[in-house]
Amino acid sequence: MRKPSLSKSRCSRRIAIGMAGAALTGLVLAPQALAADQLKAPRPYVFNYDWNNHLSLGGGHFTVGGRVYVDVKLNSGATHFRKWVTARPGQRNPGGTFHIETNIPASCPGDKNGYARGYDQATDTWAVRLPVSICVRFD
């Protein structure tokens, strides 16, 4: 049998040790990176539905027991509804949730001329703007 030369043997060992070191480093650092991603809380969200012929809003991923500021505005910035509510544990929505009926009529014809948002006071985080239709009376 032929014996491998000494230089090839050393080179193979260096490569094998280098690969083992890289794999070990990956195993040590990967759980830390994974844990950091898992600790990042999802952003709160707001959704709308009709109830009693009014625009109603709900939301999820808020802080359970925390205060949530609900705001409905026209795209021009004029406020049509605002209220502080407390986020409760949700049965269907993740995290702290809220459900609120506004005084804005539901099913307005036309384009979505406004938006609704929720602000989680505990995390200082706004939910993404939800486009909504706001009925505006012209007298």
Image (cartoon, helix red, strand yellow):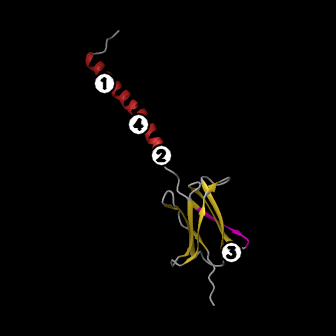
On the image, the x and y values in percent for residue 4 come to: 31, 15
Circle nearer the N terminus (4, 1): 1
Circle 1 is placed at which residue position?
14
Check disc 4 and give the amino acid type: Leu
**Between residues 68 and 51, which one lies in front from this camera angle?**
68
Whether the residues at callouts 1 and 2 have beta carbons within 8 Å, the answer is no
Measure the C-alpha gap from mark 4 to mark 3.
52 Å
In what quadrant of the picture does the C terminus appear?
Answer: bottom right
On the image, the x and y values in percent for residue 81 come to: 59, 74
Q: Main secondary structure of the magenta part?
A: strand
- Circle 1 Cα neighbour tier, 10 Å, few/some/many (<14 / 14–19 / ≥20): few
Disc sitting over residue 29 in the figure: 4
Measure the C-alpha gap from mark 2 to mark 4.
13 Å
Tell me the element at label 3: loop
Check disc 1 and give the amino acid type: Arg
Circle nearer the N terminus (4, 3): 4
Q: Residue at x 62, y 88 (%)?
A: 138
Circle 3 is placed at which residue position?
107
Measure the C-alpha gap from mark 4 to mark 1.
22 Å
Tell me the element at label 4: helix
Measure the C-alpha gap from mark 1 to mark 2.
34 Å
